Amino acid sequence: MIKRIIFSGGGSGGHVMPALTLIEELKNKGYEIEYIGGNGIESEIVPGKEIKYHLIHTGKLRRYFSFQNMIDLFKVGLGVIEAFFILLRKSPMNTLVFSTGGFVSVPVVVAAWLTGKKIFIHEQTSRVGLANKIASKFADKIFISFEESFNYFPKNKTVYSGYPVRDSCHSDSIGKVLIDGKEVNNSDRPILFITGGGNGAKLLNEKIKENLAELSQKYLVIHQVGKQFIDEYEKLKSDYYIPVKFVGEEMIDLFKLSSVVLSRAGAGTVSELISLNKRSIFIPLKIAQKNEQYHNAMEAQKKIGSMVVEEEEFSSLKLSTLLDSFLSNKIEIKETKVSDGKKIIIEEVEKLFS
């Protein structure tokens, strides 16, 4: 019997990467994988993994009034129809729909429910996104990364799995890391890695630009700037400053090599750094839904002693002073036992198909 899983999730790398982590393992186990997404970052990443990709329309879900809501509501409806006809051809007996969130996943989950499919969802953050809040009404099983999230979902169908981090998070080995064609494994300077997530972060980018002359005297600066900013920052590239629009499979090894990681506090980044016991500096996105990034970052502070700097403070401080303070504050990091999210989720998937 064919065992088929159709994934959906997107809008940011934070929704796509956990799906890809699960997909890699499930493909090795013989599952047939397809993906339904929009024209966001998922459309750039997923097809390159040799996964059948279905493109649908979707609209952004907002908790506030906007005339754009009317247009996007139409797009969501169109997306439901498109997803419905994709899923209608798949048997409910051997098909699971798995959502990792983001507004593109809502039409897919609704269509999956209409066509009688089993639905699993995974919530990455400590607070709940609107898309997954809606999807939870239709889901058969809900996986959460942080125990706090039990407060937002029905407990009878919610499982604390943890975040599905990549296997390399559980290994001390470091592979060859090429950034923009340059191998950085044997850098003659400490590596400062800055990431604002897959889409970049204007606040972090501008702070790096302001302090670049000083930073590139001391560090090898590797900077994930995001697709929309890459042209501007490519002009500043030097032997000790490498801007890239997106860091992919090499991200975990780069975390391991870095002396300092300066980052937003998306759930994936936080979970991976906790798994690596890599104490880091987080600048949570203030406008994130329900201040979710702040709560994610506080998990890292509590578990491994990471530093959390809020946006107002970060905007006014001198970056070299912050980095010096962080590096000089040598605290003992206790080994943190992290739930193996990937293993737990895949065990539940296999139970469904057994």
Image (cartoon, helix red, strand yellow):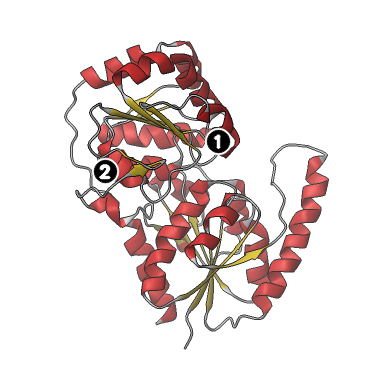
Which quarter of the rendering shows the C terminus?
Answer: bottom left
Residue 255 found in image quarter = top left
Name the residue located 41 percent from the left edge and 22 percent from the top edge: 309
Residue beneath disc 2: 276
6 and 336: which is toward the camera: 6
70 and 242: which is toward the camera: 242
Q: Is residue 86 above or below residue 62?
A: below
Disc sitting over residue 53 in the figure:
none
- Where residue 198 sits in the image (x, y, percent)? 51, 42
Which SS class for mark 1? Answer: helix
Q: Is residue 178 above or below residue 329?
A: below
Find the residue positioned furthest to the bottom. Answer: 1
- Callout 2, which amino acid? Leu
Residue beneath disc 1: 290
Name the residue located 44 percent from the left edge and 76 percent from the top edge: 31
Mark 1 or mark 2: which comes first in sequence? Answer: 2
- Callout 1, which amino acid? Lys
- Where residue 77 sits in the image (x, y, percent)? 77, 59
